[in-house]
Image: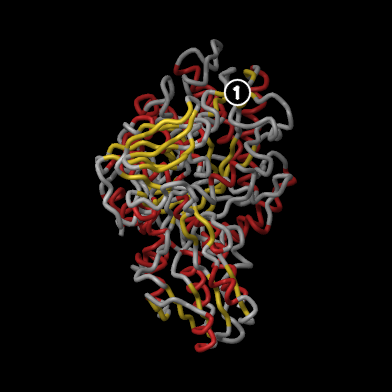
C-alpha cells in the first residue's frame, strides 16, 4: 500500500504516510506542563506505528495566547524537561514527533486569558454560531506593531525550544482562525498598515514568523505550516487565495503544508460531525498540491484506511492525517498493515467524548474507546482467575462488557432477549445522516465472533435461570424502554412510539404528528420527512433553538439547520392534551386546538428497564449494573460503564 511507503519531509524520514494531526486534549496540567497522562496518550499512538505524531497546539505566549486553561505551553524553558520526556517516550516506540506552535488570538475566552482582552490582527469579534447565534463571545483589540514584533520572536523561541526538547519537526499553526490565520484572512484582518490592507500585507506576519523560526532552528530542521484552505465563510480565505498563500509559504522555505479548513464561526467544518461526508476537505489539499513541490498533508474525517489509500493512489495528497480515527483506535496503522481491517474500531464523528468535553472544560475521552486518557491504567490484563461471566443484554454496554471480560480471560455468555445484538442503538442508526453509527455495531458484533463469546439470542434472563447456570459474576445491561405518558386517548390504534417507527414495526400513513422535541423526536421527524411524509413536530420547549438540546454541538447545529430548510412544521411551547379520532388536541399560547393527523408518534424519552437488576439484587455475589438500565444517558456512558465493569471481575 502506498499508505505505508516512507516519505521525506525536509530532513525527516517517516516510516509511513499516516499523520496524527494536532488535537487539543486538555491532558496538560493547569500550568501547561506535560503530564504522565499526556505522555501515555501519545505513546499509545506511537505503539500503533503512525508515521508522524504532531503534538497538540503549544502556546507561545501565556496567558493572552491560550486557547484553554490547561493548554500545553512552550513559552518558557521550564517546560523543556517534560516535553523532552514526551519526545523520548515516543522515540522509544520508533515514532517521529513534531510540535505545533500556536497563539489563539481572538479565538479564546476571558476565562483562558484571565480577564485580559484578547488580541488579534484587528477588532473583528469572535462570534458564537452554535450556542446563541450571532452573540459575541469576545471582542479583541488589534495588536500594536511592537507587540507583533514581540510575537514573531515568541514563535521563534517556541520553535527553538521544540528543537531543544528533541522534536523532529515543528508545525506553525496558521489555520482554523487562530492568530496567524487572523492575519492571513481578509475576514479577520481589517488593518490598513503594513500588516494588512492587501495580500502582501496580510502575508507579512506569517512570513516574519517563518523567517524567525528558521533562524532559530537552522536550515535543515523541518518546518510544517498548517493552513485553512477554505474558511467556509463570506469574505474569508478561499481555495483560490490559499493557493497564493501556499506558493508564498513554499518560497519562504516551508518543508510541508498541512491543509485544513474553517475558523471559529465555521468550526463544525473543522471537527466535522457524522453528517458531513468522509474526506470532505481532500479537494483543498489536492488544489494546493497542484501548485507546490513540497509534501502536502490532507485531513478531514478520514476514518477509513482504504479511503486514505485511494487519496494517495489518486495523487490528491502526499500524506493523510487521521485525527479522531487515531483517538478511537491507536492501533489502526498496525491493523491495516496486518490486513485486519474488520478489527479497526472506527471513529463515528459523534464529537461526544472529544469535542464536546473540551467545550465543557473537561479532558477528552472517546465515545467508543474508554481507554483514552487512561492508557496505562486501562490496558487490558489477564484476570488472576478465569470466571464464568453472564452478561444480560446485547446492546452497547453489554457487548463492550463481554468484549473486555473475554479479553481478560473470563468465560463469557451474553444473553439477549431479542433476535439481534445492538439493543436500542440499532434505532440510532436509522435517521438520516446517522449511518456512521453502524461502525460501532459492526465492530462490537465482530468482536463477539472473534473472541468466541457464547451468544444466546431470544433468551430472557430470570432469577431462576441465574440460579440454574450459577455464574460467578453477572453484568446487567438491559437498557431502557420508551416513556408512554398517561394522556387521554394514548391507547388509540393510531398512537405509536418513535422507537417502533425507527424499527420499521409500523406503517406511518401520509401525515404524522411527532410529540417531543428532544433528539429522538427531531430525528424521527426528519426520518419521516425523507420518506415523503407530511410531518408536524410538537414540543413543550419554548423556542426552536431549544430543540434537541441534549445533542452534541455540531451534530445538533446541522440537524436544526436541516429542520429549518425542510418542510417540517414545528410547534414550540405546545403541550399534548388529548388524542382524538383523526388528530391531537394541543395547548399553546392561543389556547386549545386540534391538529389533524393519521398517526401520532410519541417521543417522550426513555426510562430504565431495571427489572432484571432489581430481581438479581442480593442474589449474585458479583453483580454489576451498567448503561441505560441505571439511568438513560448516551452511548458514551453505556460503553464506558460496560468496559469498567468487566475490569472489576
Q: How is the image coloured?
A: secondary structure
Question: In front: 498, or 370?
Answer: 498
- Residue 404 pos. (x, y %): 52, 73
Q: Residues within 10 Å of mark 1 (few under 14, many from 20)?
A: many
Residue 279 vs 341, above or below: the answer is above
Residue 79 vs 48, above or below: the answer is above
- Residue 33 pos. (x, y %): 70, 48
| Quadrant showing the C terminus | bottom right
Q: Is residue 295 visible?
A: no
Question: In front: 621, or 218?
Answer: 621
Q: Which residue is painted at 51% across and 26% down in the image?
A: 133
Q: Which residue is painted at 52% across and 40% down in the image?
A: 549
Give residue 287's quadrant in the image.
top left
Q: Is residue 66 left or right of residue 539?
A: right
Label 1 secondary element: strand
Q: How many numbered markers are drawn?
A: 1
| Quadrant showing the N terminus | bottom left
Q: Is residue 401 visible?
A: yes
- Residue 576 pos. (x, y %): 46, 39
- Residue 402 pos. (x, y %): 49, 74
Q: Which residue is painted at 28% across and 41% down in the image?
A: 530
Q: Is residue 450 left or right of residue 84?
A: left
Residue at numbered disc 1: 120
Considering every residue shown, the one lying at the far top of the view is 192
Q: Which residue is painted at 47% across and 37% down in the image?
A: 539
Amino acid at each position: 500500500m502506498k499508505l505505508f511507503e516512507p516519505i521525506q519531509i525536509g530532513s525527516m524520514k517517516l516510516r509511513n504516510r499516516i499523520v496524527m494531526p494536532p488535537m487539543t486534549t486538555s491532558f496538560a496540567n493547569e500550568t501547561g506542563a506535560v503530564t504522565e497522562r499526556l505522555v501515555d496518550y501519545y505513546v499509545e499512538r506511537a505503539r500503533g506505528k503512525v508515521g508522524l505524531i504532531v503534538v497538540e497546539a503549544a502556546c507561545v505566549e501565556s496567558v493572552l495566547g491560550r486557547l484553554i486553561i490547561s493548554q500545553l505551553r512552550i513559552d518558557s524553558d521550564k517546560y523543556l524537561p517534560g516535553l523532552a520526556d514526551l519526545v523520548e517516550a515516543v522515540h522509544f516506540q520508533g515514532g517521529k514527533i513534531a510540535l505545533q506552535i500556536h497563539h489563539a488570538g481572538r479565538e479564546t475566552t476571558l476565562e483562558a486569558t484571565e480577564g485580559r482582552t484578547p488580541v488579534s490582527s484587528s477588532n473583528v469579534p469572535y462570534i458564537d454560531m452554535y450556542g446563541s447565534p450571532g452573540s459575541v463571545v469576545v471582542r479583541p483589540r488589534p495588536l500594536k506593531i511592537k507587540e507583533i514584533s514581540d510575537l514573531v520572536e515568541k514563535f521563534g523561541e517556541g520553535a527553538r525550544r521544540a528543537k531543544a526538547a528533541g522534536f523532529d519537526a515543528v508545525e506553525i499553526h496558521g489555520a482554523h482562525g487562530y492568530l496567524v490565520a487572523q492575519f492571513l484572512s481578509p475576514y479577520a484582518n481589517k488593518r490598513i498598515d503594513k500588516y494588512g490592507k492587501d495580500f502582501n500585507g496580510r502575508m507579512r506576519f506569517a512570513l516574519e514568523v517563518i523567517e524567525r523560526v528558521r533562524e532559530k532552528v537552522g536550515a535543515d530542521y523541518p518546518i510544517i505550516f498548517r493552513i485553512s484552505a477554505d474558511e467556509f465563510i463570506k469574505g474569508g480565505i478561499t481555495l483560490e487565495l490559499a493557493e497564493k498563500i501556499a506558493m508564498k509559504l513554499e518560497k519562504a522555505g516551508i518543508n510541508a503544508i498541512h491543509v485544513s479548513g474553517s475558523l471559529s464561526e465555521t468550526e463544525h467544518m473543522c471537527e466535522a460531525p457524522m453528517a458531513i461526508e468522509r474526506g470532505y476537505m481532500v479537494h483543498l489539499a489536492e488544489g494546493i498540491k497542484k501548485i507546490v513541490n513540497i509534501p502536502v498533508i490532507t485531513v478531514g474525517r478520514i476514518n477509513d484506511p482504504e479511503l486514505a489509500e485511494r487519496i494517495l493512489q489518486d495523487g490528491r495528497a502526499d500524506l493523510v492525517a487521521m485525527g479522531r480515527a487515531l483517538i478511537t483506535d491507536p492501533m489502526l496503522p498496525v491493523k491495516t498493515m496486518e490486513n485486519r481491517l474488520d478489527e479497526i474500531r472506527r471513529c463515528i464523528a459523534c464529537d461526544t467524548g472529544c469535542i464536546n468535553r473540551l467545550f465543557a472544560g473537561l479532558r477528552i475521552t472517546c465515545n467508543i474507546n474508554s481507554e483514552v486518557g487512561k492508557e496505562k491504567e486501562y490496558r487490558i490484563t489477564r484476570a488472576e482467575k478465569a470466571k464464568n461471566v453472564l452478561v444480560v443484554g446485547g446492546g452497547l454496554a453489554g457487548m463492550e462488557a463481554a468484549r473486555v471480560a473475554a479479553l481478560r480471560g473470563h468465560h463469557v455468555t451474553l444473553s439477549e432477549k431479542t433476535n439481534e445484538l445492538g439493543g436500542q442503538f440499532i434505532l440510532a442508526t436509522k435517521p438520516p445522516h446517522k449511518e456512521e453509527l453502524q461502525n460501532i455495531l459492526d465492530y462490537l458484533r465482530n468482536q463477539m465472533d472473534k473472541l468466541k463469546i457464547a451468544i444466546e439470542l431470544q433468551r430472557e434472563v430470570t432469577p431462576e435461570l441465574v440460579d440454574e447456570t450459577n455464574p460467578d459474576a453477572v453484568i446487567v445491561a438491559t437498557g431502557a424502554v420508551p416513556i408512554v405518558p398517561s394522556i387521554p386517548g394514548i391507547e388509540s390504534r393510531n398512537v405509536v412510539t418513535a422507537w417502533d417507527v425507527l424499527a420499521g414495526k409500523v406503517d406511518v400513513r401520509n401525515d404524522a404528528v411527532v410529540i417531543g422535541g428532544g433528539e429522538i423526536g427531531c430525528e424521527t421527524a426528519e426520518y419521516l420527512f425523507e420518506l415523503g411524509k407530511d410531518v408536524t413536530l410538537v414540543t413543550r420547549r419554548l423556542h426552536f433553538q431549544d430543540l434537541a438540546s441534549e445533542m452534541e454541538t455540531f451534530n445538533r447545529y446541522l440537524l436544526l439547520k436541516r429542520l429549518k430548510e425542510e418542510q417540517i412544521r414545528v410547534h414550540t411551547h405546545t403541550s399534548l392534551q388529548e388524542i382524538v379520532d383523526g388528530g391531537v388536541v394541543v395547548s399553546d399560547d392561543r389556547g386549545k386546538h386540534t391538529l389533524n393527523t393519521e398517526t401520532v408518534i410519541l417521543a417522550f424519552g426513555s426510562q430504565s428497564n431495571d427489572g432484571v437488576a432489581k430481581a438479581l439484587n442480593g442474589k449474585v455475589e458479583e453483580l454489576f449494573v451498567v448503561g441505560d438500565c441505571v439511568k438513560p444517558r448516551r452511548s458514551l456512558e453505556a460503553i464506558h460503564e460496560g468496559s469498567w465493569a468487566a475490569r472489576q471481575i
